């Protein structure tokens, strides 16, 4: 167990705290939940940086890091869909969660056939993640009602991240297409 792996485990451990804070009946609960989500997002960057810098990458960390990320995002999206209950959150949430399922399955299948490098993380994925995290923090920090500038900004950023999410999924599928299409008859 090293520091990068402990940071990743901490990110998973913050999920129930994040949920609890979001549902507390206090005026500060949304902001507190957003701060915990932000802390978890920062540890995502930090654990990867430290693992590379200190050469402490481990198979456990390589497995758990993307799982922790997907859990945090999925939980945040589910909370927001429940509390906002509108198209502007629900449609992007479906796109983002659906894409994660498709790409996770694609990566697993590509690894099985020895072509995992064809679906490696790209810079587009980093832009998607940045827009998504900022949107989630903004929306988590602000209640659905009243609809303020911040809520609208969160909706716009979430829509942008959904578009980038679809675009990155198409790029992954295009890269994997030679392995997905049926063999041509000889």
Image (tube, rainbow, N blue to C red):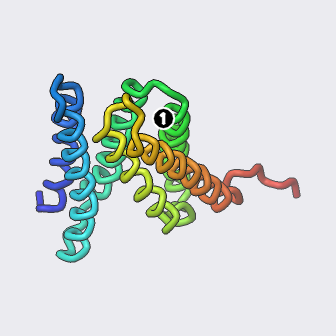
The residue under label 1 is: 89
In the depicted structure, whether residue 119 falls above or below residue 142: below
Quarter of the image with the N terminus is bottom left
Q: Secondary structure at mark 1?
A: helix
Residue at position x 32%, y 47% in the image:
137
Q: Is residue 111 or residue 9 the one in the foreground?
A: 9
For label 1, count other residues whose C-alpha is less than 10 Å away and answer few (under 14), some (14-19) or many (20+): many
| 118 relative position to 141: left or right | right
Image position, residue 99 (x, y; %): 53, 44
Image position, residue 160 (x, y; %): 53, 52
| 171 relative position to 90: left or right | right
Residue at position x 39%, y 24% in the image:
82
Residue 80's image quarter? Answer: top left
Q: Is residue 40 or residue 49 the one in the foreground?
A: 40
The image shows a total of numbered marks equal to: 1
Q: Is residue 97 or residue 3 the one in the foreground?
A: 97
Image position, residue 135 (x, y; %): 40, 48
Image position, residue 152 (x, y; %): 46, 42
Quarter of the image with the C terminus is bottom right
Residue 62's image quarter? Answer: bottom left
Residue at position x 27%, y 53% in the image:
41
């Amino acid at each position: 167990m090293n520091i990068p792996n402990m940071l990743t485990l901490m990110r998973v451990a913050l999920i129930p705290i994040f949920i609890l804070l979001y549902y507390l009946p206090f005026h500060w609960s949304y902001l507190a939940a957003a701060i915990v989500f932000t802390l978890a997002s920062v540890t995502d960057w930090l654990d990867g940086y430290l693992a590379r810098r200190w050469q402490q990458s481990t198979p456990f960390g390589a497995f758990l890091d993307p799982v922790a990320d997907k859990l945090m995002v999925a939980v945040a999206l589910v909370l927001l869909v429940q509390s906002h209950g509108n198209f502007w959150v629900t449609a992007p949430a479906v796109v983002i969660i659906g894409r994660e399922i498709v790409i996770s399955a694609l990566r697993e299948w590509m690894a099985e056939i020895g072509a995992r490098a064809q679906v490696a993380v790209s810079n587009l994925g980093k832009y998607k993640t940045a827009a998504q995290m900022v949107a989630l923090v903004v929306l988590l920090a602000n209640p659905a009602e009243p609809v303020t500038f911040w809520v609208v900004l969160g909706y716009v950023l979430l829509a942008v991240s959904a578009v980038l999410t679809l675009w990155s999924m198409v790029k992954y599928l295009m890269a994997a297409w030679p392995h997905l299409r049926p063999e041509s008859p000889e």
